[in-house]
């Protein structure tokens, strides 16, 4: 029985990046001791964090209520990339290390729960396929820039990166509001009676 296509794994992505400079693939991420392999892995991870920080349908948590602990501190998960107060929370809050900090009152002590919208960083293989492809293409272009710097020698063109980003953005739009035109108050003449 044929399994069909599967999303890129992190190992596939690292080998795709290595392939852009004709470097031999690695068999495992555990053995990435080769300088090129570890650099490819580092660029993949930093690019993933960069792309995910924007916030997409798959890594946004909206209206999350965080409760203070016995020390009146609010511990944050280690994968928080960005956050903002939401709902009834009147204070401006930010992340300081793994703690929530109240900028308005200049304290890390909270008397009541705080509602936030946050962007969480996910592991590569937890991402949807469109995000994996875009991150891989973007990371490969960055990797090539470090070695060659000349766009004419790149395996991936800027157009490849743009096409991968468009695919990711389209999926984000479809998830957020698939009936955007039907629901829009600004579109006239398109609504069915």
Image (spheres, rainbow, N blue to C red):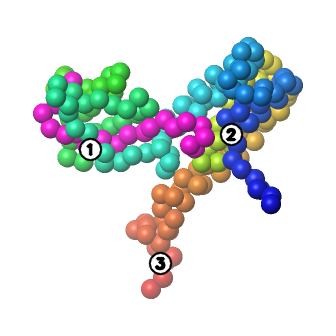
Based on the picture, tell me whether residue 118 belongs to the magenta stretch: yes
- Kindly report the distance in space between the C-alpha atoms of the residues bearing marks 2 and 3: 43 Å
The number of numbered discs placed on residues in the rendered structure image is 3
Query: Which corner quadrant holds the N terminus?
Result: bottom right
On the image, the x and y values in percent for residue 66 come to 26, 39
Q: Is residue 7 left or right of residue 103?
A: right
Q: Earlier in the sequence, mark 1 or mark 3?
A: 1
On the image, the x and y values in percent for residue 95 come to 33, 27
On the image, the x and y values in percent for residue 34 come to 75, 15
Q: Secondary structure at mark 1?
A: strand
* Label 3 CA crowd tier, 10 Å (few <14, some 14–19, many 20+): few
The magenta-colored residue range is: 108-127
Q: Nearer the viewer, mark 2 or mark 1?
A: 2
**In this picture, is 116 found above or below 155?**
below
The answer to which of 134 and 149 lies nearer the viewer is: 134
Residue for point 30% across, 25% down: 99
| Residue 104 visible to an observer of this rendering | no
Can you identify the residue that label 2 sits on?
9
Can you identify the residue that label 3 sits on?
191
The circle on residue 135 is none
Q: Nearer the viewer, mark 1 or mark 3?
A: 1
Can you identify the residue that label 1 sits on?
65
Q: Is residue 192 left or right of residue 95?
A: right
Residue for point 41% across, 29% down: 78
Residue for point 31% across, 48% down: 63
Q: Secondary structure at mark 2?
A: loop
């Amino acid at each position: 029985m044929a399994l069909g296509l599967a999303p890129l794994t992190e190992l596939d992505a690292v080998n795709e990046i290595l392939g852009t400079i004709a470097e031999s693939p690695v068999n495992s991420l555990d053995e990435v001791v080769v300088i090129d392999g570890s650099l490819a892995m580092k660029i993949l991870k930093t690019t993933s964090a960069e792309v995910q920080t924007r916030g997409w349908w798959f890594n946004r948590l909206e209206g999350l209520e965080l409760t203070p602990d016995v020390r009146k501190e609010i511990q944050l998960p280690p994968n928080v990339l960005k956050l903002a107060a939401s709902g009834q929370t009147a204070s401006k809050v930010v992340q300081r290390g793994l703690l929530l900090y109240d900028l308005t009152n200049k304290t890390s002590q909270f008397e009541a729960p705080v509602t936030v919208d946050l962007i969480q960083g996910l592991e590569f293989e937890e991402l949807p396929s469109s995000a994996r492809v875009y991150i891989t293409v973007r990371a490969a272009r960055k990797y090539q820039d470090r070695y060659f710097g000349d766009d004419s020698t790149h395996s991936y063109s800027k157009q490849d990166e743009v096409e991968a980003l468009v695919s990711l953005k389209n999926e984000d739009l479809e998830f957020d509001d698939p009936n955007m035109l039907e629901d829009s108050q600004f579109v006239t003449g398109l609504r069915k009676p």
